[in-house]
Amino acid sequence: MSTTMNCSNCGASSPAVQTMIVENCPRCGSDAVNVCHFERVDESVKLHESWTGILKDPSRPSREKERQRFKSGADFWRDKLRWVQLERFIDRDNARYFEKVTDPETGGVIHQCNEPLPEHRGHDSTADRRCGGSLPKGVDAVD
């Protein structure tokens, strides 16, 4: 941490001791001084982006208005505590469910499901086998 003394009157700036009580500027004698403390913090932030959308048909009753739903982009995989790429599309008019989860670092497919919507029953180890077979070696099922 660094501490500086700045004079509002003459513009003088000098390093100051953190415990020092500054009453007057050592250059011009003015009492209009400010003591500023600066601390450098090195942090980084990584942003993740995703899009979600819903297509509704206003002519239908409220429980049937939603016709399509999608999500595309980054999603946090809680079991493995890491970010993955998710593509999900639910089409009620054509009764289809599509979902693909990929590892953004390797590009490998972690999970893929493309099935009729009435047959889709959520995410468990049986859903992965039902949606197209086995998972890549060393990858557990997405719950």
Image (tube, rainbow, N blue to C red):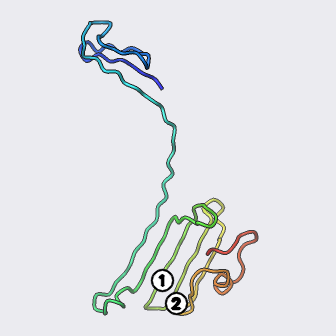
Q: Pick the residue in front: 31 or 72.
A: 31
Q: Where is residue 59, by image quadrant?
A: bottom left
Q: Pick the residue in front: 41 or 117.
A: 41
Tell me: 121 left or right of 52. Answer: right
Do residues under tags 2 and 1 come within 8 Å of each other at their CB atoms? yes
Label 1: state its secondary structure. strand
Circle 1 packing at 10 Å, graded few (<14), some (14-19), many (20+), is many
Percent position of residue 6, x then y: 32, 18
At horizontal 53% and vertical 85% (from top left) the residue drawn is 97
Percent position of residue 8, x then y: 25, 18
Percent position of residue 56, x then y: 34, 84
Pointer 2 or 1: first along the chain? 1
Q: Where is residue 137, by image quadrant?
A: bottom right
Tell me: 113 left or right of 48. Answer: right
How far is mark 2 from mark 1, CA to CA? 8 Å
At horizontal 40% and vertical 15% (from top left) the residue drawn is 20
Label 2: state its secondary structure. helix
Tell me: 95 left or right of 25. Answer: right
Percent position of residue 34, x then y: 31, 21
| Amino acid beneath label 2 | Leu
Task: Say which residue label 2 marks.
Answer: 117
Q: Residue furthest right?
A: 137
| Amino acid beneath label 1 | Ile
Task: Say which residue label 1 marks.
Answer: 90
Mark carried by residue 115: none
Circle 2 packing at 10 Å, graded few (<14), some (14-19), many (20+), is some
Q: Quadrant of the C terminus?
A: bottom right
